[in-house]
Image (cartoon, grey):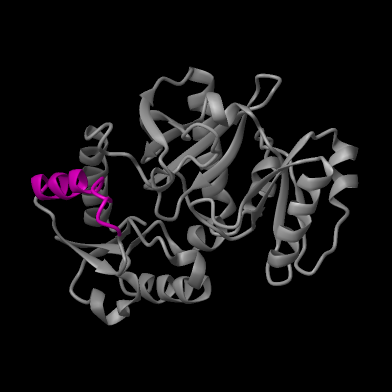
Amino acid sequence: MRVALASYAELPDWEVDDRHLHAALSDQGVDFEVVSWDSGVEAFEGFDGCLLRSTWDYSERLEDFLAWAGALARRMPLYNPPAVLAWNTDKRYLRELEAAGLPVLPGVWLEPGEDPDLAALMKARGWERGFLKPWVGAASSGTLRFDCDAAGLERARAHLGRCIAGEGMLLQPYLESVEQEGELSLVYVDGELTHALRRRPRPGDYRVQEAFGALDELAEASPGNLELGRAALVAAARSCGQEPPLLYGRVDFLRTAAGELVLNELELVEPHLFFRLFPGAASVLAQRLRERLGAGRP
């Protein structure tokens, strides 16, 4: 069995997390090769399936990426499938999860070209600090936190003006808890939790990605949180016309000032799975991938 691990050409040297997956695949008797997704579909000839791992530039070339995924999936199993990728690469998926009854961080969806009154929107909702992010984006690109004083609102309006001409934006309350408690992330493989972790930004920052100096550590999640994460993944699969469970996914939560845990992001495209914190998860993923390919399951 041969598996392609889709990546991109400029993968940074500090990304070593998937070495645990490489070892696990070898242990399972699965041959693999890391292939840049934009090498073309022909570069994936001879593989039995493809697992998306580090296609981190997809948000900059989304149309090309989705076209490539669709073409590849007509030749071999792709994990996760193209319908999931198309759904999850646009943050408007959060509206569907909210409609399904899941607790989602509230927000205001700003259409491309819109010129909203940010001060009025914030005041109407009682939000003292705000957060802006694009509908399509990754690794905190295009985001901004701001205060509701004159200077903060001016910064937000300028940022929004630069972004919204060509893309939709999401306005949310800024949750202070991210700076102290961080983000709780639950990693699932084949519908089952493998591990939970807490991701804390460096002091004064809000970004929980390693590239910005964030720190990660294993964490525990309550039974209620585990069920909430599983419910989010089931709702996502069904929204995409897929039979749950999906092969893998990561569910990210933040805590509100009232102490409620709310869904912040659902990562189903090329989620960072933090194998270095729990290498056993790489073994589970390798095994379940081999089983699905052997059975011809999406």
Residue 101 located within the stretch drawn in magenta: no
Q: Is residue 79 left or right of residue 228?
A: left
Q: Quadrant of the N terminus?
A: bottom left
For this orientation, the residue located farthest to the front is 151
Q: Quadrant of residue 262?
A: top right
Q: Residue 71: horizontal and vertical position, in percent?
A: 40, 77
Q: Is residue 29 above or below residue 284?
A: below
Q: Residue at x 28, y 32 (%)?
A: 277
Q: Is residue 165 above or below residue 156?
A: below
Residue 23 located within the stretch drawn in magenta: yes
Q: Residue at x 65, y 35 (%)?
A: 102
Q: Quadrant of the C terminus?
A: bottom left
Q: Is residue 72 left or right of residue 173?
A: left
Q: Residue 100: horizontal and vertical position, in percent?
A: 67, 40
Q: What range is drawn magenta here?
A: 12-28
Q: Residue 91: horizontal and vertical position, in percent?
A: 62, 54
Q: Is residue 281 above or below residue 291?
A: above
Q: Residue at x 39, y 33 (%)?
A: 215
Q: Is residue 148 left or right of residue 133?
A: right
Q: How many marks?
A: 0
Q: Residue at x 84, y 45 (%)?
A: 150
Q: Is residue 110 left or right of residue 213?
A: right
Q: Residue 118: horizontal and vertical position, in percent?
A: 84, 50
User: Between residues 260 and 79, which one lies in front from this camera angle?
Assistant: 260
